[in-house]
Image (spheres, rainbow, N blue to C red):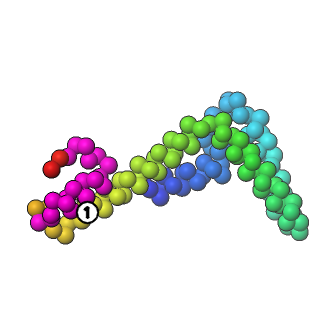
Amino acid sequence: DLREARQRLRDLRYNPQRYVPENDPTAELLRKRERAVVWSDSLRAEGSGDPGERRRAFLAIRELNDRILARHPGVAERFRRKVEQQEEQVLENAVADRRDYFFALFSRPALETLLERLPARKEFAI
């Protein structure tokens, strides 16, 4: 799940058109982006020997992606939150999967440290 959430966040960076509505006010930016992608594809297909031209196409696409995402900050934030939630879940699972010793054999400070690391620690008390 964490890998999928990270991949989706990365995909948002490089393919924002997949995550914004088609009738969105950014439609003109989406059209410009599509033209820049076609330009980049044609340079690649031609095997253009001018790396500067390919770089300009790449930067044009990146700049348009940034502008599209800037108009939809909630989407990126939602994806980042999902990654953070999945990272927390991985940490919780690591703690929950640790079955080395029965909890009563741990010292009180060790248990308190464990509880501090749990995101939902407010529900527990020693």
Q: Is residue 56 visible?
A: yes
The reply, left or right, for residue 69 in relation to residue 112 is: right
What percent of the width, then of the height, locates residue 24? 67, 31
Task: Name the outermost residue toward the front.
Answer: 109
Under mark 1, the amino acid is: Asp
Q: Nearer the viewer, residue 125 or 31?
A: 125
What percent of the width, then of the height, locates residue 94? 31, 62
Task: Name the outermost residue toward the left.
Answer: 104
Quick check: 16 above or below 72?
below
The N terminus is located in which quarter? bottom left
Q: Does the magenta portion include 35? A: no
Quadrant hosting residue 55:
bottom right
Residue in the picture at 75% in, 48% down: 63
Residue in the picture at 54% in, 51% down: 8
Chain part drawn in magenta: 105-124
Mark 1 residue crowding within 10 angstroms, few (<14) / some (14–19) / many (20+): few
Q: Is residue 45 visible?
A: no
Quick check: 32 above or below 38?
above
Q: Nearer the viewer, residue 51 or 126?
A: 126
Residue in the picture at 85% in, 66% down: 51
Residue at disc 1, secondary structure = helix
Q: Does the magenta portion include 120? A: yes
What percent of the width, then of the height, locates residue 5? 48, 52
Residue in the picture at 25% in, 58% down: 113
The reply, left or right, for residue 108 in relation to residue 80 is: left
Q: Which residue is mark 1?
A: 97
What secondary structure predominates along the stretch shown in magenta? helix
What percent of the width, then of the height, locates residue 96? 25, 59
The reply, left or right, for residue 108 in relation to residue 3 is: left
Q: How many marks?
A: 1
Quadrant hosting residue 76:
top right
